[in-house]
Image (cartoon, grey):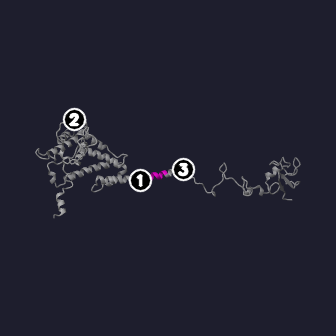
Amino acid sequence: MPNSSDSATSVTPSAYAVYDDPLYITAHDQITNSLVDTPFNGTDFMNWKREIMLALMSKNKDGFITGTCQKPAVTDKKYEHWKRVDILVMQWILHSIEKKLRENFKYVTSARQLWGELVECYGQINSLELYQLKKDLGAISQDNSIVVEYYSRLKKTWEEIDALDPIPQCTCGAMNSCTCVLLKRMFDREMQSKLLQLLMGLNSSFENVKSNILTMEPMPTINKVLGLLQKVEKQKSISDTAGALTEANAYASIKHPSTQPESSSKRVKLDTEEKPVKVCSHCKKKGHDVTECYQLQTCTFCGVFGHVEHQCYQARSLGRGRSQGGYGSQGGYGLQGGYGRGRGRSNSYHKKGSNVYKRTDK
């Protein structure tokens, strides 16, 4: 009995055998399908051409326009199948062109013929367009944009120039036996030119980084340089943010100083003139302290304890000059019969209201 695994190996075809056949189509491959999102309108043919090629390559149908999938003989059993697929590819391309231009190609008979006419009509190098692209490329700089946006503008312009004026390819096959790696050297030279252009357009904040990159041997690739520039840009952004926060906090501390209340031991009671108010610790009254309290002093006029001189004058209805209260200005009897400047002896007590002041020399 034969081995089951050997039997399965001998009859099961490759899983990709069907998909590798350019004549294979699916239920989704409709004749009215378009290969691109934006139909060709007569301008920017190179970018449109590239999108068409990529779409056909993904479906394994690019051979119908390049000639690698050749038309079989009429007697071949695959002839009718090939013809149907070729018409399908031709319709895909036609539905990727605006209707007003589609009318110019309605009598073509194959996808390859259609593609050849399109290239002949629109694929010639436009010197004016190429001039404008290279002029725009020279004016691109970073300015205030981030690195990735700046690089995207450069890359888009590079690709448009390459599509409009591609590097010539060897068609004789001599490059296949070349041993001096000429193609690689040409490619490296092109990449170095683009890298230098990228560095020249950076703003002044990357001067140190540019100097370091230019001294590297060998020169790094554009992708590595782009990654390095983005890291430096991120670090600079973090530093600027931290500096801005510090400056904002300092400004806020100056504009809005701390309003925490002082402790009660440090607070001083102030009057309307911002001067400390005296409070007597003996009589608890304001306006004087304990050293000035009249209740703890002896009158210098009458010698009685518990009041001061001006209160004595008020109790006797005397003026401060003592010339109108019955006291003379020179001792002895005054003009109205009172005692002079010396202390009076006719009264042992005198009153002011309910306060009684007793003499201390009795």
Residue drawn at 17 percent across, 57 percent down: 11
Name the element at disc 2: helix
Please name the amino acid that badge 2 sits on. Glu
Residue at image mark 3: 256
The structure residue drawn at horizontal position 80% and vertical position 51%, both measured from the top left corner, is 311
Picture coordinates of residue 37, whole percent (x, y): 28, 42
Mark 2 or mark 1, earlier in chain: 2
First in residue order: circle 3 vs circle 1 = 1
| Badge 2 vs badge 3, beta-carbon distance below 8 Å | no
Disc 1 marks a residue whose amino acid type is Ile
Quadrant of the image containing the C terminus? bottom right
Residue 267 lies, in percent from the top left, at 63, 55
User: Which residue matches tag 2?
Assistant: 103
Name the element at disc 1.
helix
Q: Which portion, as a residue range, is magenta? A: 238-248
Above or below, comparing residue 337 to residue 263 in the picture: above
239 within the magenta span? yes
Front tag of 2 and 3: 2
Q: Residues within 10 Å of mark 1 (few under 14, many from 20)?
A: few
Which residue, given by chain and number where applicable, does mark 1 sit on?
Answer: 238
> Which residue is painted at 45% across and 52% down in the image?
243
Of labels 2 and 1, the one closer to you: 2
Q: Between marks 3 and 1, how big is the CA–CA gap?
A: 27 Å
Marks 2 and 1 sit apart, C-alpha to C-alpha, by 58 Å
Q: Please identify the quadrant where the N terminus is shown.
A: bottom left
- For label 2, count other residues whose C-alpha is less than 10 Å away and answer few (under 14), some (14-19) or many (20+): few
